[in-house]
Amino acid sequence: MGLGLALAISGCASGTAAPSYSGPAVSSGSEPLTLMMPGPSGSSACARISQRLSALTRPQLGFEIQLEQQPFARYESALWQRLMQKQAPDLFFLSAAQTLAAHVYENNVYPLDTLLERYPTLYGAFSPTQWDSKRKYRRIYAVPSGTTDCYCGGFLARQDLLDALGIQTEKVRTLSQLHSLLLRVKEELPDVLPVVPDYGRMNLSLGEDPLDDQLGVLLRGEGTRVQNLYASAGYAGLCQEMYRWRQEGLILQNACLRSEPAVDLMRVCRGFGFFCRLNADTLDCYSRAYGESLAAIPLNEMIQNSSGLPDGWGLPVQPSKKEEALAFLELLCTDPEAAHLFLYGEEEDQDTAWADRWCNANCCLGVRAAESAPLPESGKARVSPAYGFSVNASECMAEMDSCSAVVRCYNHALLGGCLDPNEALPLFLNELNEAGIEKVIAAKQQRLDNWLNAR
């Protein structure tokens, strides 16, 4: 979100001509291929796009598609429940919110190595690094989502309000400069809320490499020593800054308790903007979702790490339409019409939830928008020394789960300015220590050292 979520195959929506699907023919009888993903689309929108996609998959692949979306706030729990009950869909999205290692540990996902041999176009659509991010115990357990791995921390703001105030975003490149801009917004536009959250998150970044889950990270400019992000001076400074912003009335008061996407809160609360991860596609994706032009304000340097790679597509262990699932993903790499439908829905229904929401295309547009975000060049991105590394620390899964629960209790509230960091941060760090954060960090460090030495 990172997220933000990537829900399609990289490069699928290319506007150039592409050959029709020529992979192995699949026939699954009368039952459709079921696919589950996070998103805001209702059942009627999903049914409509399922019907349109089925018109393409039926003659080419021999089966129909049945799409389902679950709200972002409930997606992980809904998917996990179905996996535990052995009632999973044939194809499901795996977000970075739940590590692939956890799904492998619980025997939720099926190894794909043998199956992928029949789908060379699908396999060739991703780099070795992307496939390695889906490899656990030397086996591939998911298909990459195609998420871009170059990004910078930033802020998206309403272009119409910037124009009304005569503000040039090119002059805003630091958190301090953004603070001054937001104070002006509050003063001159008192009915506008300067900052809204995105699913209860502020999405602020220190430029760290999260090493999958933020439980032990590589801090910017501090080499390959795995450290506790939440114990860093930079994190404490962000918490203090956001607490001050909330006291000044710049942030939605109950930010950490909101479960809506930022674009919805922008409408409901007449918001000015929100923090997000910026990449080459972000501006177009969020502008589509909001329905009006937004402006991108990058706040730090472009970085490249593996934090976008955890997203992917998984197949259940129990009997399911496994070959059909891979055939559908491969079709998205060869059929522009199918890819466009999957990403954007129908052109004539732009007011529907499916077509109007960013989540189906975020970070995976095959064709760049005419006006892309004013970002530093990807070729000049600061590459993490752990780029391509994927954590596999099964011996401390219990500690990772406990630490994640503690982070959920404190992190969003602190970065949303809802808690006084002078009081809450010491409690946060103490509970992390009790949950076993040092064991997690030590396990990550050992594996990272082994990975670096083997290169």
Image (cartoon, rainbow, N blue to C red):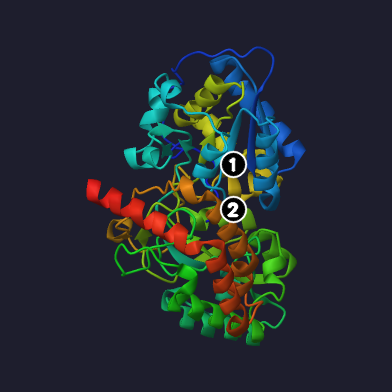
Check disc 2 and report the residue beneath it: 288
**In terms of depth relative to the viewer, which is nearer, 163 or 435?**
435
Q: Position of residue 315 (x, y in %)?
A: 56, 30
Cβ atoms at labels 2 and 1 below 8 Å apart: yes
User: Which residue is rendered at x = 36% and y = 67% of the image?
Assistant: 301
Q: In this view, does 6 lie to the left or right of 405?
A: left
User: Which residue is rendered at x = 34% and y = 42% of the image?
Assistant: 129
Residue 48 in sight in this render:
yes
Q: Where is residue 24 in the image (x, y as percent from the top left)?
A: 46, 15
Please, what is the three-letter code of the amino acid marked with disc 1? Tyr
Circle 1 crowding by C-alpha within 10 Å: few under 14, some 14–19, many from 20: many
User: Which residue is rendered at x = 65% and y = 60% of the image?
Assistant: 199
Q: Where is residue 336 in the image (x, y as percent from the top left)?
A: 49, 31
Asked if residue 272 is positioned above or below residue 246 in the image, the reply reads above
Name the disc covering residue 226, or none. Answer: none
Distance of label 2 from label 1 (alpha carbons): 9 Å
Residue 3 in sight in this render:
no
Check disc 1 and report the residue beneath it: 344
Asked which secondary structure carries label 1, the reply is helix
Q: Position of residue 103 (x, y in %)?
A: 55, 40
Please, what is the three-letter code of the amino acid marked with disc 2? Arg
Sequence order check, earlier mark of 2 and 1 = 2
Outermost residue to the right: 44
Query: Which quadrant holds residue 1?
Result: bottom right
Q: Is residue 79 left or right of residue 309?
A: right
Asked which secondary structure carries label 2, the reply is helix
Asked if residue 363 is positioned above or below residue 225 in the image, the reply reads above
User: Which residue is rendered at x = 64% and y = 21% of the image?
Assistant: 64
Q: In this view, does 91 lie to the left or right of 364?
A: right
